[in-house]
Amino acid sequence: MDENSHALSVLGGLAIGIVGFQFFRTVLPWIYANVVGPKVFGATVKLAEMGEWAVVTGSTDGIGKAYAKELARKGLKLVLISRSLNKLNDVSKEIGDEFGVEVRVIDVDFTGGTEIYEKIREKTTGLDVGVLVNNVGISYSHPEYFLDCYNADPAFLNNIVAANVHSVTHMIALFLPVMIAKRKGVIINLSSTAGVIPNPLLSVYSATKAFVNKFSDDLQTEYKDHGILIQSVQPGFVATNMSKIRKASVFAPSPETYVKSALSTLGIASQTAGYLPHALLQLVIHFTEAVFGDQFARSLVLKNILGTRKRALRRLAKDQ
Ligand SMILES: NC(=O)c1ccc[n+]([C@@H]2O[C@H](COP(=O)([O-])OP(=O)(O)OC[C@H]3O[C@@H](n4cnc5c(N)ncnc54)[C@H](OP(=O)(O)O)[C@@H]3O)[C@@H](O)[C@H]2O)c1
């Protein structure tokens, strides 16, 4: 073997080593978290053994209502928390009749001040809460530049932060002590794929969702040894009022399909897209960033979101 071919074989060996290392470090864990784990070991966390009650915020519609139904199906009693009392009463009756569990409701507006958490505390004192789903969230009506959004309604951006960030921290502060005392409990926080990929023109919304991921991650480390499981769930599009997608599809599933899938990742992944097609979408974007560079990926996303904004503004102009 001459010197050149020796150098080539060393380089080849190195390349195979790097690819192999990356495969074991990233590809295998991804396959376990998104495919093998949920399919083979899914639903290993016995939610009904965490406590008698589950609390779900934003539970009269969409993803929150679907979580409430799945938890009732597992035999948990429910505290549903949302804005509209009429809708809460309707959903409470619907779930109570279908699953035969006790359902209580609390009407609060999560864009309100901290006094709403006193109301929630008063109405839940003494309940053996084992599961908390921080689902409530609000977003822009359509993608918009930050300053246009701010100038149109500065209070709206406050509301997004209150509903998407303050609700999560305050609700966890309310129910974590009960869970720690029992040394068991599950907290599921609804983030979004928007929190893990570039998301211009929805910048405040996506930043609140990035907060949810980071907060959940560090909190999990703090309280893991106390028997608390904390999961941050990052959906892509789901067919709900928020996404304005009426017809479910593979990439925008119904809330019921999404939640069944997300629950199968509990105990397997602490940060998860919750649904294989959404995990693949995140993978494609991260792959594009890694291979073609961050700027290329960002410009692709921006072009796509600008198209969505243009169509939304056209619809708004037509409706006026
Ligand atoms: N849908 C998606 O494509 C998608 C994608 C990624 C992440 N997510 C996240 O998933 C979560 C649920 O979204 P969704 O699509 O299911 O939403 P949705 O269909 O719009 O439902 C929102 C729920 O929250 C309640 N709610 C809204 N504003 C509230 C407020 N100020 N105070 C109290 N309750 C309020 C609503 O109650 P009322 O009916 O009484 O108003 C409703 O029950 C959110 O955190 C969202 O950011 C959604």
Image (cartoon, grey):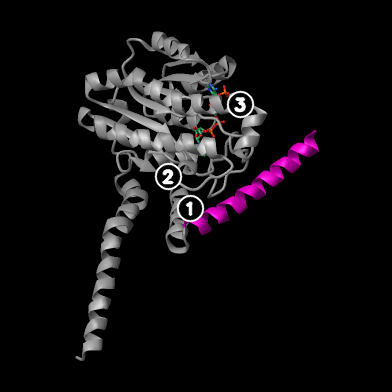
The amino acid type, in three-letter code, at marker 3 is Pro
- Residue furthest toward the top? 122
Magenta highlight on residue 45: no
* Mark 2 C-beta to ligand 1 under 8 Å: no
Tell me where residue 178 appears, x and y as whole percent: 28, 18
Q: Identify the secondary structure beneath mark 3.
A: helix
Evaluate if marks 1 and 2 touch, with contact meaning CB atoms under 8 Å apart.
yes
Q: Nearer the viewer, residue 80 or 292?
A: 292
Query: Which residue: 42% across, 44% down?
Result: 273
Q: Is residue 87 visible?
A: yes
Q: Which residue is mark 2?
A: 273
Image height check: is 248 above or below 97?
below
Q: Which residue is mark 1?
A: 281
Q: CA distance from mark 3 to mark 2?
A: 31 Å
Residue visible at 45% across and 51% down in the picture: 282
The amino acid sitting under disc 1 is Leu
Q: Earlier in the sequence, mark 3 or mark 2?
A: 3
Left or right, residue 219 beside residue 114: left
Q: Position of residue 107 (x, y in %)?
A: 52, 14
Q: Which mark is residue 154?
A: 3
Q: Label 1: state its secondary structure.
A: helix
What secondary structure is found at the residue carrying circle 2?
Answer: loop
How far, Cα to Cα, is label 3 from label 1? 32 Å
| Amino acid type, residue under disc 2 in the picture | Ala
- Judged left or right of residue 176, residue 94 is right
Query: Which of marks 1 and 3 precedes in the sequence?
Result: 3
Q: Mark 3 vs mark 1: give the one in front.
A: 3
**Range drawn in magenta:** 294-320
